[in-house]
Amino acid sequence: MKSIKKSLLGLALAGTIGQIFIAGAAVGGELYTFKDGKLDRPTGYREWVFVGTPLTPNDMNNGKAAFPEFHNVYIDRKSWDQWKEKGTFRDGAIMVKELIDVGSKAAPSGKGYFEGDFIGLEATIKSKKLFPKEPGNWAYFSFSTPDHKALTDTATAFPTAACNACHDASAADDFVFTQYYPVLRAGKGKGKDATGGTLSDLTAK
Ligand code: HEC
């Protein structure tokens, strides 16, 4: 009996220590693994903060949008915290855009574009340490296969001219297209008012 109690206590302790360790790792470390020039496919991003859904449907882009079609864009929570407090993107920020095809063009609510299936994943990371030579220290990655039917396990950063240059030239805030993300626009430096529902004014300034 005593030994059962002891081993139960041991298990409980091991569980607690495990939890502390996992919590510590999540707080201290970044949400991505980059080694030997390769970024592991990010995970867990559907539980990050959702910032907006740009849409480039194939049928408005000669049948072949560069990023088909809906883009569900997320930012990691640590970066969101800094964004709503200071209005800046922290070093170590990661954003992902998950691609979803147009599944249907009619719904009980009317004609339109409605999200179908997941068809790709892109990511960008801001890191002085990892990407000292990239303008703004932002590097860009794609995990989409050319046929958009699967995801790769790792990705290497695109050359600056392929992605970074357009973000540099046209994005509204740092290298991020906040002009298309109402959640970021409305939440910049707003603290509690960034979280929604606290203001009657709907204008995202
Ligand atoms: C010609 C301009 C242009 C190029 C080139 C470009 N992007 Fe973007 N990117 C955009 C625009 C505009 C948005 C926001 C609207 C959207 O998603 O359609 C965006 C958004 C993103 C986002 C979401 C976060 C953010 O910064 O707004 C990621 C991730 C991204 N692009 C990855 C890439 C990758 C990877 C490449 C290179 C393969 C690339 N982009 C090349 C224009 C560009």
Image (spheres, rainbow, N blue to C red):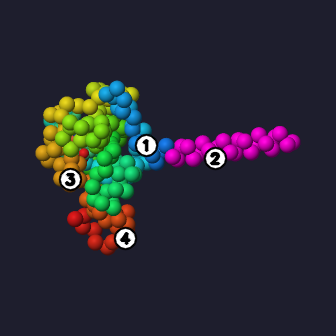
Quadrant assignment for ligand 1: top left
Q: Are marks 2 and 3 in contact (CB under 8 Å)?
A: no
The CA distance from mark 1 to mark 3 is 25 Å
Q: Indicate which disc, 2 or 3, sits on the residue closer to the N terminus.
A: 2
Kindly identify which residue carries mark 4. Answer: 198
Kindly identify which residue carries mark 2. Answer: 16
**Residue at the far left in the pictured view:** 169
Do we see residue 109 in this rendering?
A: no
Q: Indicate which disc, 2 or 4, sits on the residue closer to the N terminus.
A: 2
Kindly identify which residue carries mark 3. Answer: 173
Which range of residues does the magenta coloring cover?
A: 1-24
The CA distance from mark 4 to mark 3 is 24 Å
Q: Amino acid at mark 1?
A: Gly
| Quadrant that contains the C terminus | bottom left
Q: Indicate which disc, 1 or 3, sits on the residue closer to the N terminus.
A: 1
Looking at the image, which residue is at 37% across and 66% down?
192
Q: Amino acid at mark 4?
A: Thr
Looking at the image, which residue is at 72% across and 42% down?
10
Residue 22 lies in the magenta stretch: yes
Residue 86 place in picture, x, y as percent: 30, 60
Do we see residue 37 in this rendering?
A: yes
Residue 29 numbered tag: 1
Q: Indicate which disc, 4 or 1, sits on the residue closer to the N terminus.
A: 1
Q: Nearer the viewer, residue 109 or 170?
A: 170
